[in-house]
Image (cartoon, rainbow, N blue to C red):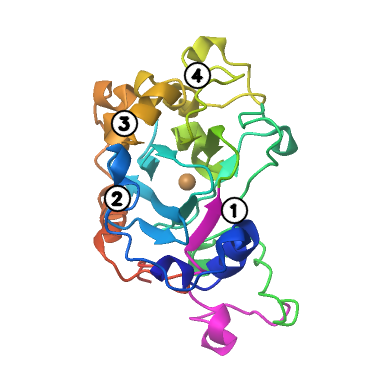
Amino acid sequence: MKALGVGTAVGVLGGAASGQADDDDDEGGDDAGADDGRQVDDDDSVAGDNTVHVVRTLIGPSTNPERPADFYYQPTGLAIDPGDVVRFVFPTPDHTVTSYHPAFGMQRRLPGGVDPISAPITGWDPDSLPDDIDEPPAEPGAGGGEEMEQEGDGTDGGEQSGPRPSTWLHAFDTPGVYDLECAPHETFGMAMRVVVGDQTDTDFEVSDPSALPEPRVGPVGLARQVLTDPNLRPEAIYQEGRVEWQDLEVNQQASSTETETGAEAETGTATETEAETATETTTES
Ligand SMILES: [Cu+2]
């Protein structure tokens, strides 16, 4: 119920999963998807016949000297049923959800026949942009953006000011393995895997980082290690249901050497709140 009532998400969900839109009385979803023994997130819910799974974009203290902080999807591995929806929640700003696909200049890491996937730029805070960067486009019907001064707090901009919607939903209809990455943070290892149904075989490498094609064809940076982590094998995700970032071997081996990330780490803990909706983030300005 709550997953269907959020702002921009309605359009996406309506388009992607309109086949189940004939029934309005959504169930509570307390035990949704639990009959197969999988662990279910407390926030998961039910839309029609399908479960809505929650994945969050988080920032935490660094566990690897090669990055200033941990940028990750939680969970990092997720097994769902065909037709299920993933509700991506962006408690921290400046992330994307982008599939590995030639349309984005990368190796194809999607099931056959599936179109490239990318969330709109979501959850970012315009006030976080440096002064010398181009202003983002205004919202549709807002007049092209030439009047967006954004000098102070931008109160004359009305609803244009403040963080952008922080939730995005996508329905995964085709069984198979989907590898997703965050464009700004892929080199830091921000990537995840969704296994839909019981189709765990892939045409792409999932176990040997040295066997991956060279950038910019395959995953780059630490994402190569994340997406070839033993605990993120499609079979492991399918068996576990969900794999947490902290469960990855690459994160268990790494040691923390960076202590300057306290503020960003606190931002990550904002995910504990239940208040986020599509029209506001938990980020305070
Ligand atoms: Cu990111």
User: Residue 14 has which mark?
Assistant: none
Q: Tag 1's secondary structure?
A: loop
Residue at horizontal 61%, vertical 59%? 19
* Viewer can see residue 91: no
Position of 255 with respect to 207 (left or right) is: left
Q: Is residue 173 left or right of residue 134?
A: left
Q: Is residue 102 above or below residue 211?
A: below
Q: Which mark is residue 119?
A: 1
Of the residues shown, which amino acid type is indicated by label 3? Glu
Q: Quadrant of the C terminus?
A: bottom left
The residue drawn where x is 45% and y is 20% is 228
x and y percentages locating residue 109 in the rendered image: 61, 29
Structural distance between the alpha carbons of marks 4 and 2: 25 Å
Residue 116, x across and y down, in percent = 68, 42
Q: Which amino acid does label 1 sit on?
A: Ala
On screen, 252 above or below 12?
A: above
State the extent of the magenta-drawn residues as a range: 146-171
Q: Nearer the viewer, mark 3 or mark 4?
A: 3
Report the amino acid beneath label 4: Val
Q: Name the residue under label 2.
A: 41
